Image (spheres, grey):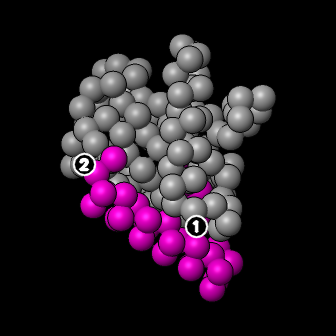
Amino acid sequence: MDERIFNRLKVMIEKTYYVFGRYNVPATFGLIYHHKPILPIELGQYVRKSDHFLMVDEHYCFINFEFTNQKDAFKASQNLIASLDNHFQDTTTKIALDSFDVNQSPNVVYNRLMQILKEIQKDPYSRIDDENVLNGVI
């Protein structure tokens, strides 16, 4: 990952940790993968206004489901996938979610999301999953 992008990712995660510490509001981090290149303007049409995203490259996007617990982030991910499926007329979008833990460094957050995404991609019927897919893997 480009250093500038990682620095922006780091700031986004640390800001979320700060908001959590100050106001005790939930958040969930996710990583979106799409087989075809996706532009920020395309993705921005379907991401909720309360969420923030950062394009990692043309296929991967980090998303911060702000003020959203993991259960609700899963539902938001389902809605996002349905919208992207309709937009692209395919089913190649996959989303990894990870539990919110302020003790994890931004590097650990990103690496865990990539691991979850790799596990999702092994199963042709799986499109969204969380850290439970890593049980027995890590």
Q: x, y percentage for residue 53? A: 38, 56
Mark 2: amino acid: Pro
Q: x, y percentage for residue 96? A: 55, 39
- Nearer the observer, 94 or 113: 113
Q: Which mark is residue 67?
A: 1
Above or below, 36 relative to 63: above
Going 40% across and 34% down the picture, which residue do you hit? 33
Above or below, 56 relative to 20: above
Going 44% across and 65% down the picture, which residue do you hit? 10
Above or below, 86 relative to 130: above
Above or below, 91 relative to 87: above
Going 41% across and 21% down the picture, which residue do you hit? 91
Mark 1: amino acid: Phe
Is 8 left, or right, of 26 in this rendering? Answer: left
Q: x, y percentage for residue 133? A: 69, 31
**Split into 4 quadrants, where in the image is the C terminus?**
top right
Tell me the crowding category of disc 1: few under 14, some 14 to 19, or many 20 or more residues within 10 angstroms, Cα based: some
Residue that extends furthest to the top in the rendered view of this protein: 124
Q: Which mark is residue 40?
A: 2
Q: Is residue 82 visible?
A: no
Q: CA distance from mark 2 to mark 1?
A: 22 Å
Residue 24 part of the magenta-drawn span: yes
Task: Tell me, yes or no, whether the two marked residues, 2 and 1, touch with CB atoms within 8 Å.
Answer: no
Q: Which mark is residue 127?
A: none
Circle 2 SS class: helix
Circle 1 SS class: loop
The image quadrant of residue 84 is top left
Residue 51 part of the magenta-drawn span: no
- Specify start and end residues of the magenta stretch as a single range: 1-30
Going 58% across and 16% down the picture, which residue do you hit? 123
